[in-house]
Image (cartoon, helix red, strand yellow):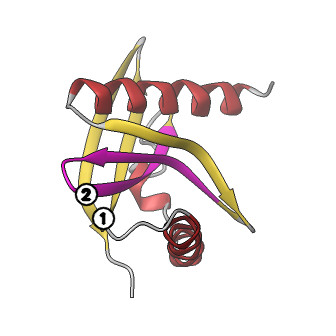
Amino acid sequence: MAQHNELGKKGEQLAVDFLLKKGYEIIERNYRFQKAEVDIIAKIKDTLAIVEVKTRSSIDFGNPQDFVKPKQIQRLVKAVDEYLTTNGLEVEVRFDIIAVVKENNKFKIEHLVDAFYHF
């Protein structure tokens, strides 16, 4: 597996562990619909948190959250709409980003709640 794929998997696992410690219930991981992949679907109280995980080995080229592009957001929204419809869910939905940056041998995690809005 390529090194960046391993870093991405590590970042996703760190994000899941982080969410679990904060009281979230992990509902799905790597949910796919058409060209979209939702990294984590988690539940906290009555809200479904759609979590995009961005992991980087440094911030030399910008913060991880800066790499979530409008086209990706459109795909995520479409995938989540499908997920809600398929599962017959009527819940509050928000889109979060968890940015994971490797600093030396440690990982810094930043959770951006309600990071972007869908239209």
Tag 1's secondary structure?
strand
Dot 1: within a 10 Å radius of its alpha carbon, few (fewer than 14), some, or many (20 or more) residues? some
**Label 2 crowding class (10 Å Cα cut-off): few <14, some 14-19, many 20+?**
some
At label 1, the amino acid type is Arg
Seen at 33% across and 56% down, the residue is: 48
Quarter of the figure that contains the N terminus: top right
- In the rendered image, residue 69, in percent from the top left (x then y), is placed at 52, 70
- Return the residue at label 2: 47
- Count of numbered circles on the image: 2
Q: Which amino acid does label 2 sit on?
A: Thr
Q: Is mark 2 on a helix, strand or loop?
A: strand
Please state the extent of the stretch shown in magenta in the rendering. 37-55
Name the foreground residue: 102 vs 27.
27
Give coordinates of residue 94: x percent, y percent. 30, 64
Q: How far apart are marks 2 and 1 (CA)?
A: 7 Å
Which residue bears the numbered disc 1? 94
User: Which mark, by number, is residue 43?
Assistant: none
Q: Where is residue 61 in the image (x, y as percent from the top left)?
A: 48, 50
**Tag 2 near tag 1, CB within 8 Å:** yes
Say left or right for 56 vs 20.
right
Q: Which of marks 2 and 1 is nearer the N terminus?
A: 2
Which residue is located at x 27 percent, y 37 percent? Answer: 24
Q: Which residue is drawn at 35% across and 71% down?
A: 90
Which residue lies most toward the right here?
1
* Nearer-the-camera pick, 63 or 28: 28
- Position of 71 relative to 58 (above/below): below
